[in-house]
Image (spheres, rainbow, N blue to C red):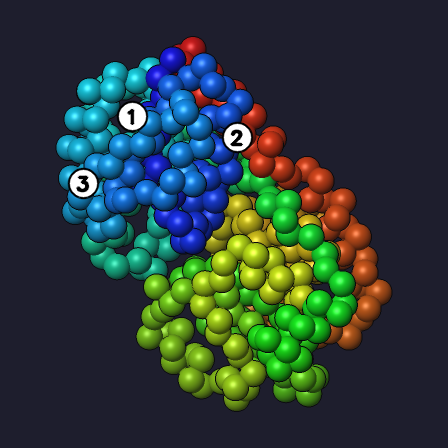
Amino acid sequence: MKIAVNTRLLIKNKLDGIGWFTYETLRRITVSHPEVEFYFLFDRTYDQSFVFGSNVTPIILNPQARHPLLFVVWFEWSVKRALKKIKPDLFLSPDGYLSLSSDIPSLAVMHDLNFEHFPNDLPWLVRWYYRYFFPRFAKKATRLATVSEFSKSDIMNQYDMLAGKIDVIYNGVNESFTPIENTEKEIVRNRFTGGCPYFIFVGSLHPRKNLVRLFGAFDQFKKLTQSNIKLLIVGEKKWWTKEIESKFNEMTFKEEVVFCGRLRADDLHLATASALATTYVSYFEGFGIPIIESFLCGVPVITSNITSMPEVAGGAALLVDPFDESSIASAMALIAENQQLRDDLIYKGFERVKLFSWDNTSNQLWNSILRTLEN
């Protein structure tokens, strides 16, 4: 059997949510199925660590696909030509993009449809690409997978898809995310916040991550409590907007907000495990990996009461209205002042996270591959 895979998001030290999904599942599937020939399609020079075994053949296809017009060229010309040459039994696309002009059976993993609900959060050309092509990708795919029941329902409603065509495959969690000792927490806090406790946000600094209201809520919290707690922001400013910039500049306590950019996996673990709590109050998510990473670290979570986040949290997090700064600020105050609440959330988080593992995710994705081949 031959399987070609879109691996353009496997970039050393730059894995995001979908990149981690790609890495963790393929690393396991390729090793578990040595009888299968895998062809990894990259759009740039790849790191050798992504060639997981002798049954993996890496192929570089030009041009680098990081712009809507280049997406079209890469998938409709470069990928199509590669698939015609490889003649795989299946094309697997962990980020949902497909080649509409190829007739190879395909499995597309669509993580969420945020662009359908909040199109103005994206530049117009990116918005056009997603809203034009993804409905067509959904129709073209032999089968679809997604990462939550919420996203499955959303895909069904937005694109008029049958439930039987879509598999739900929950994300896993990196097992290196574990609790750490208090002495190590002190070292980490000294590194990032001068020794002060902190709330942590992890993610791309994108409008839908709701930084505008998080900043406003943190300001309210600081005025309410007069505490020394800081806010640590982990992520790149790739999608930083004028609205986010303006809100930040208006903050009374902006000096208490620490930006540390993207962190390597080991540093991200330490930063998360040393936090007083995670504040993950997006207004749209298909899953929300930082929620379960925090659970595994023994860190309480404040997250939104909409889209997939209540489903992922499963009663183990403090839920807030992401559109209400006072709701977020009140949750921060509760976490800061109530040790019993923190302990209760930590216990519930440890129980909840037992349901999530990359081994399970990989097995479910493989089953979805088999269903696609059966179709």
The nearer-to-camera label among 1 and 2 is: 2
Task: Give the residue pinned by disc 1.
Answer: 140
Dot 1 or dot 3, earlier in sequence: 3
Near-viewer residue (162 or 262): 262
Three-letter code for the amino acid on which mark 2 is drawn:
Arg
Label 3 element class: loop
User: How dense is the environment of label 1, judged by Cα within 10 Å: few (below 14), some, or many (20 and up)?
Assistant: many
Q: Residue at x 64, y 39 (%)?
A: 356
Q: Is residue 339 above or below residue 165?
A: below
User: How dense is the environment of label 3, judged by Cα within 10 Å: few (below 14), some, or many (20 and up)?
Assistant: some
Q: Residue at x 52, y 77 (%)?
A: 258
Measure the alpha-carbon separation of dots 1 and 2.
27 Å
Q: In the rendered image, which quarter is residue 362 located in?
A: top right
Q: Residue at x 77, y 75 (%)?
A: 337
34 horizontally vs 271: left or right: left
Label 1 element class: helix
Three-letter code for the amino acid on which mark 1 is drawn:
Lys
Q: Quadrant of the N terminus?
A: top left
